[in-house]
């Protein structure tokens, strides 16, 4: 039995702030007040400060002397920068996972099924969630913990959601593209790494 994932207080606070940014509670350029978050969540300011520091590393927020912490005004160019890095990582993951996924693609199939439902309903939130879950399972199938950690550190879900919310980069269909990748893995396509890389780059916002 798999043990439940236990998130640290800092991680929980970080997820709370990220959700606030993605949902539009805090808009681009708006100040995030450390003390208010601490009071709201009934925690000390130290883990809030640590969470904000991590989000600054992810370039979601920025701090300036005498101005405090604010949500960054991310542009299409800012969001676009992450995609070549992500594409390279996922190309490596696909090549490492090729044999495993040729034998068994069951880890990917539920996400594709969920994407068909999300596409039909026009549910952008579900499209983001299951698209990211699909790619996370792909990277996880590579069996390389360093690769997975590096991919996770890019904040894929956040930037995918922000691309849709702020730049309107929503596609009509997410399921069909991901189904095509599942089929490529299943038939052990020798060009699977290149296919995955092209797929990721094709999702990038355009400046």
Image (spheres, helix red, strand yellow):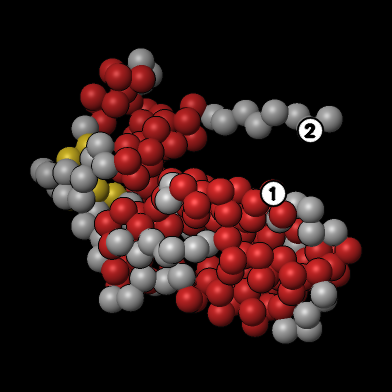
Q: Quadrant of the C terminus?
A: bottom left
Pick whichever, 122 or 9, lies toward us.
122
Q: Quadrant of residue 175?
A: bottom right
Q: Is residue 75 left or right of residue 201?
A: left
Q: Look at the picture and state if 187 lies above or below 182.
A: below
Q: Residue 179's spot in the image, x, y percent? A: 66, 65
Name the residue tied to disc 2: 2
Task: Tell me which label, 2 or 1, sits earlier in the chain.
Answer: 2
Name the residue tied to disc 1: 110
Calculate the distance from the C-alpha at mark 2 to the C-alpha at mark 1.
19 Å
Q: Residue 49's spot in the image, x, y percent? A: 34, 35
Q: Residue 107's spot in the image, x, y percent? A: 75, 52
Q: Is residue 124 left or right of residue 114?
A: left
Q: Look at the picture and state if 16 lies above or below 121.
A: above
Pick whichever, 33 or 200, lies toward us.
200
Q: Is residue 52 left or right of residue 140?
A: left
Q: Residue 28's spot in the image, x, y percent? A: 20, 50
- Asked if residue 145 can be seen in this view, the reply is no
Q: Quadrant of the N terminus?
A: top right
Q: Residue furthest right?
A: 103
Q: Look at the picture and state if 25 lies above or below 46.
A: below
Q: Are marks 2 and 1 in contact (CB under 8 Å)?
A: no
Q: Residue furthest left?
A: 66
Question: Tag 2: Cα neighbours inside 10 Å, few (<14), some, or many (≥20)?
Answer: few
């Amino acid at each position: 039995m798999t043990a439940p994932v236990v998130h640290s207080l800092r991680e929980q606070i970080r997820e709370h702030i990220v959700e606030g940014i993605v949902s539009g509670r805090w808009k681009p350029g708006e100040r995030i007040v450390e003390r208010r978050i601490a009071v709201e969540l009934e925690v000390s300011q130290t883990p809030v400060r640590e969470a904000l520091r991590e989000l600054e590393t992810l370039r979601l927020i920025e701090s300036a002397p005498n101005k405090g912490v604010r949500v960054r005004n991310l542009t299409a160019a800012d969001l676009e920068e992450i995609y070549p890095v992500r594409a390279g990582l996922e190309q490596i993951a696909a090549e490492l996972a090729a044999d495993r996924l040729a034998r068994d693609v069951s880890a990917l199939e539920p996400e594709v099924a969920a994407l068909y439902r999300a596409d039909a309903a026009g549910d952008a939130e579900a499209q983001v969630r299951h698209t990211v879950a699909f790619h996370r399972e792909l990277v996880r199938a590579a069996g390389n913990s360093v690769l997975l950690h590096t991919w996770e550190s890019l904040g894929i879900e956040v930037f995918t959601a922000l691309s849709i919310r702020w730049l309107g980069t929503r596609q009509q269909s997410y399921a069909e593209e991901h189904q095509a990748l599942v089929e490529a893995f299943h038939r052990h396509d020798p060009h699977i790494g290149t296919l995955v890389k092209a797929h990721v780059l094709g999702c990038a916002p355009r400046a």
